[in-house]
Image (spheres, helix red, strand yellow):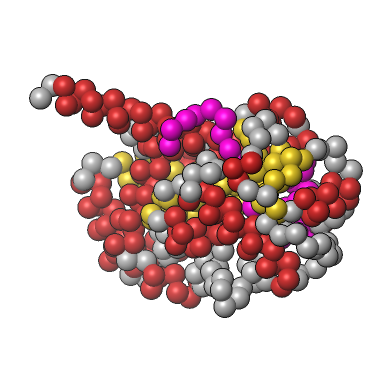
Amino acid sequence: MKKSENIVVGISIGDLNGIGGEIVLKTFEDSRMLDFCTPVIFASSKTMLFLKKQFNSSINFNDINQIDQVVFGRINVLNCWKEPVTIDFGKEDFKIGEYAIKSLQEATKALKNDAIDVLVTAPINKHNIQSEEFNFPGHTDYLAQELGGESLMFMVTDSLRVGLLTDHVPVKDVALKISSELIEKKINTVYDSLQKDFKINRPKIAVLGINPHTGDNGVIGNEDDEVMRPTLAKIKEEGKLVYGPYAADSFFGSNNYKNFDAIIASYHDQGLIPFKTLSFGQGVNFTAGLSKIRTSPDHGTAYEIAGKGVADENSFKEAVFTALQIFKNRFDYERLIENSLKKASKTR
C-alpha cells in the first residue's frame, strides 16, 4: 500500500438480473464521486450500455480491455466478456451466475496484483453461482481463499459494527462449530480490524451468548458456561477489553450495544437481524481480516424490484466510501508503524 490518493475502486457487477447494475449506475451518476476515487467496473461495455439505456443514465464510460488502460477521473469499464448477454430482470439464471463469477474473478485478480486498491462487490445469487469450478457459499469464503488472512463478516455503519463467529452455517451446526480456538481467532480479527481499519486504539468488544439467556446456568445448554465464558475470561486476562457473553434477546433493545465499539454474534441471524433492523439501507458488509479491502452493500439481488428503476443505491454508495476510508486508515496505520520502527531503531 503506497498511496492514499487516486484510489482505484474495482467493482464486480454481481447478478445482472438483480439490482446490482442499477445501484452501480446510480452511485456514479453523482459526478462528485470521481473526486474521491476512480472506478473500474468489471463487466463489458455492451452490458453496461444496455443497463445505461434501461435506467436512462447519463453516465459516460471509458471502455478498456486491460487493467493498465485505466484513466483516472473517469468511470472505466473493463471488458471481461465480449458477447452480448441476455438480461431478464428478476429471474434466476445460471448463465447469468457465470457472468457474475467472471466479473468477480477478474476483479479479484486485479486486487491481488495491486492493479486496483479496493474491491466493492454488487450482490450475487448464492445459488446460481455454484459450479464445479466455483463452489463457495458466497464472496467471503472465495476471497478468503484468494487473498489470505482470517476472514470475518463485519457489518458496519458509523455507529454500529457487528461481527460473526459463524456466518453461513446451518443453525443446527452452530454450537458444534464454536470452539475456544474459533472464539479467540474471531475476536483477534475484530480487535485488529478496529485498530487498523477504524482507528480505535483500545476497542471495547461485546460478545453475545450461544444459547437463549446464555444457557441459564445449563438449563438451556452448556456451551456458554463450558466454552464461551472461560475463553472470554482468558482473552480479557491478556489485556483486551472483551465483555460477555450477553443474552442476545435484550442486548440491542436495551441500547447496550451503544457502549461498545463492536459486537460479536454467535451466528448469522443473531447478529444480522438487529443490524439490518437498525440500519438497513445504510449498512456495509466489510470482510475484515483479509490482506486486501472488500466491501459490499447490506442487501441482496432484490429480484422483486430489479429492472424497475426504484432500487436504493445508498448502501452501495456507503460501501464505496467505507472501502475508501478503510484504505486511508490502513495507509495511516502502516505509516505509523513504519515511523515507530524507525524511531525504535535510532534509539538502539
**Which residue is painted at 64% across and 69% down in the image?**
129
Q: Position of residue 337 (x, y in %)?
A: 30, 31
> Is 84 placed left or right of 286 in the picture?
right
Picture layout, residue 133 above or below residue 240:
below
Q: Nearer the viewer, residue 33 or 227?
A: 33
Picture layout, residue 211 above or below residue 310:
below
> Is 215 placed left or right of 72 in the picture?
left
Q: Nearer the viewer, residue 310 or 106?
A: 106
Residue 95 location, quadrant: bottom right
Q: Position of residue 276 (x, y in %)?
A: 62, 50
Q: Which residues are magenta?
A: 1-27
Q: Nearer the viewer, residue 286 or 11?
A: 11
Picture layout, residue 288 above or below residue 346:
below
Residue lying at the far bottom of the rendered structure: 132
**Which residue is painted at 43% across and 50% down in the image?**
290
Q: Position of residue 175 (x, y in %)?
A: 40, 70
All told, the count of numbered labels is 0
Inspect the magenta stretch and tell me whether residue 19 lies in it: yes
**Which residue is painted at 51% across and 62% down in the image?**
142
Residue 214 location, quadrant: bottom left
> Is 189 placed left or right of 297 in the picture?
left
Q: Position of residue 343 (x, y in %)?
A: 21, 23
* Residue 150 in view, yes or no: yes
Quadrant where the N terminus lies?
Answer: top left
